[in-house]
């Protein structure tokens, strides 16, 4: 039986909130040890069953992972791709501080395949934005996106290290995004990708190529992302 205090919040949820707060404030980071069931029971003056229930809930959320014979540890952040969200929205939804490092922000030409994906003539000028995505001090994704330069050349002057591309499109350009067609596959990291992501050359990565459309059905962004496979989960709901 779970004890519910007078304020209506079950004790196990109070324990979860305390641990969640420590994770969100970065007091506890990925790989750090979380107090054991016995420690939590002593600190919060509850039964072992209540402490166990609290940790099990956090594990289901993906915030912690329990290793047999070793204890409970803060899990590495994982991003779920079942909803079209910006990186900023994804990270903020997990209580994490989003960080990006802009590697490239310029106008390019002669990107024939990219232009075709966006339904543009082969000779079209494009805005190319390449960013290294980070959480804490650790890189976990390399993303490159292209937009038609005719309409969006102003993006080369936007500080996308801090600003959300999706939000900037809506607020500064009046474009609202609606859906994306995506290709997802597993591949291996070449030397450049591996160095930026801090992994070994040839290590497995998740690659996502996507064309993102506006609410008017126009292709706005073509993106290619390489994601550390241990940091991401692809969630798909199927109907019959």
Image (cartoon, grey):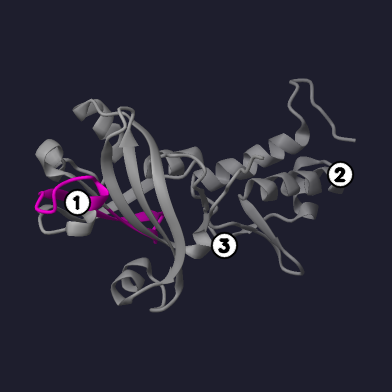
Q: Which residue matches tag 2?
A: 47
Q: Are marks 1 and 3 in contact (CB under 8 Å)?
A: no
Query: Residue 75 at x, y = what percent?
Result: 59, 57
Rendered-image quadrant of the C terminus? top right
The correct choice, above or below, for 111 with respect to 156 in the image is below
Could you tell me which secondary element the residue under label 2 belongs to?
loop
Q: Which residue matches tag 1?
A: 115
Which numbered disc, 1 or 3, marks the residue that appears first in the sequence? Answer: 3
Whether residue 155 is in magenta: the answer is: no
Name the quadrant containing residue 57: top right
Categorize mark 1 by other alpha carbons within 10 Å: few (<14), some (14-19), many (20+): many
Query: Residue 111 at x, y = what percent?
Result: 16, 58
Which residue ends up furthest to the right in the rendered image?
A: 1
- Residue at 62 percent across and 43 percent down: it is 238
Categorize mark 2 by other alpha carbons within 10 Å: few (<14), some (14-19), many (20+): some
Q: Which residue matches tag 3?
A: 31
The answer to whether residue 111 is left or right of residue 42 is left
Which residue ends up furthest to the top in the rendered image?
A: 7
- Residue at 44 percent across and 44 percent down: it is 91
Mark 2 → mark 1, Cα distance in angstroms = 62 Å
* Of the pair 81 and 75, the residue shown nearer to us: 81
Whether residue 132 is in magenta: the answer is: yes
Mark 1 → mark 3, Cα distance in angstroms = 42 Å
Mark 2 → mark 3, Cα distance in angstroms = 26 Å
Which numbered disc, 2 or 1, marks the residue that appears first in the sequence? Answer: 2
* Of the pair 227 and 114, the residue shown nearer to us: 114
The correct choice, above or below, for 22 with respect to 75 in the image is above
Which numbered disc, 2 or 3, marks the residue that appears first in the sequence? Answer: 3
């Amino acid at each position: 039986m779970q004890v519910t205090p007078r304020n209506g919040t079950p004790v196990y949820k109070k324990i979860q909130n305390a641990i969640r707060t420590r994770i969100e404030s970065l007091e506890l980071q990925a790989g750090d040890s979380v107090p054991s069931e016995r420690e939590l029971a002593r600190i919060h003056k509850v039964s072992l069953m209540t402490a166990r229930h609290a940790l099990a809930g956090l594990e289901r959320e993906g915030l912690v992972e329990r290793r047999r014979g070793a204890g409970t540890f803060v899990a590495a952040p994982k991003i779920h791709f079942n909803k079209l969200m910006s990186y900023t929205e994804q990270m903020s939804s997990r209580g994490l501080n989003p960080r990006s490092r802009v590697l490239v922000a310029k106008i390019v030409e002669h990107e024939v395949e990219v232009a075709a994906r966006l339904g543009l003539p082969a000779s079209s000028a494009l805005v190319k934005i390449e960013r290294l995505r980070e959480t804490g001090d650790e890189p976990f994704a390399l993303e490159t996106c292209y937009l038609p330069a005719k309409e969006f050349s102003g993006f080369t002057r936007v500080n996308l290290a801090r600003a959300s591309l999706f939000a900037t499109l809506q607020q500064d350009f009046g474009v609202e995004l609606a859906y994306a067609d995506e290709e997802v596959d597993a591949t291996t990291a070449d030397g450049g990708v591996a160095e930026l992501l801090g992994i070994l050359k040839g290590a497995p990565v998740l690659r996502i190529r996507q064309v993102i459309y506006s609410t008017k059905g126009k292709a706005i962004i073509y993106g290619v992302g390489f994601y550390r496979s241990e940091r991401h989960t692809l969630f798909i709901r199927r109907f019959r």
